[in-house]
Image (cartoon, helix red, strand yellow):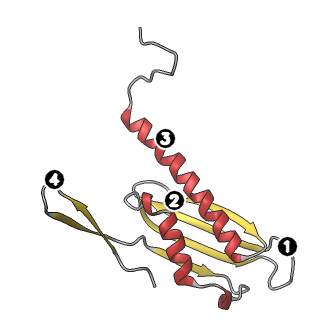
């Protein structure tokens, strides 16, 4: 179950308030047949990923999280896998993968990777949209 929509208020120059409803990020969590679901709190995963990626909410249409136990229940190291796929509006989906000893650790690492990937991608796309010449520090336009 996804978290309820957050309500944001911002002050007007006078005494009024403008209230806007911010829709929650759509997050779908999927499991493979080998992963013990009882150790995963799905609403907590949705909230953690939603909070981490909230600044990109206007560019992302949906996030899919795929959790897997690559050792099929055997005890090995680095066998928990988390793949996060973000569906970006008007672009191809982007995905990151992280393996760790625990599901929580794999989710945390994959989330950090996705934050970095989206920040890098959107930063580059914003630069391309802005266009024009750039001036580097220490250079002057001629």
Residue 77 numbered mark, or none: 1
**Which secondary structure, mark 3?**
helix
| Disc sitting over residue 124 in the figure | 3
Residue 118 image position (x, y, % from top left): 52, 53
**Position of residue 72 in the picture relative to residue 108 (left or right):** right
* Crowd rating for badge 2 (residues with CA inside 10 Å; few <14, some 14–19, many 20+): some
Residue at the image position 46 percent from the left and 21 percent from the top: 135
Distance CA(mark 4)–CA(mark 2): 40 Å
Looking at the rendered structure, the secondary structure element under dot 4 is loop
Residue, disc 2: 93
Left or right of 49: which side holds 68? right
Q: Secondary structure at mark 1?
A: loop
In front: label 3 or label 2:
3
User: Dividing the picture into quarters, in which one does residue 10 lie?
Assistant: bottom left
Mark 3 and mark 2: span between their CA atoms?
A: 16 Å
Sequence-wise first label, 1 or 3: 1
Mark 1, Cα crowd under 10 Å, few <14 / some 14-19 / many 20+, is: few
Report, in whole angstroms, how far the alpha carbon at label 2 lies from the one at label 1: 29 Å
> Which one is earlier in the sequence, the residue at label 4 or at label 2?
4
Q: CA distance from mark 4 to mark 3?
A: 34 Å
């Amino acid at each position: 179950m996804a978290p309820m929509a957050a309500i944001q208020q911002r002050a007007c120059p006078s005494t009024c308030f403008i209230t806007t409803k911010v829709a929650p990020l759509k997050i779908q969590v999927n499991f493979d047949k080998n992963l013990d679901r009882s150790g995963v709190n799905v609403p907590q995963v949705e909230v953690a990923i939603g909070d981490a990626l909230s600044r990109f909410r206007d560019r992302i249409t949906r996030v899919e999280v795929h959790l897997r136990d690559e050792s099929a229940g055997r005890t090995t190291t680095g066998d928990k896998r988390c793949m996060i796929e973000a569906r970006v509006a008007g672009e191809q989906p982007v995905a990151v993968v992280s393996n760790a000893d625990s599901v929580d650790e794999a989710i945390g690492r994959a989330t950090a990777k996705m934050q970095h990937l989206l920040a890098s991608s959107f930063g580059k796309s914003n630069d391309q949209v802005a266009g024009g010449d750039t001036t580097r520090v220490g250079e002057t336009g001629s």
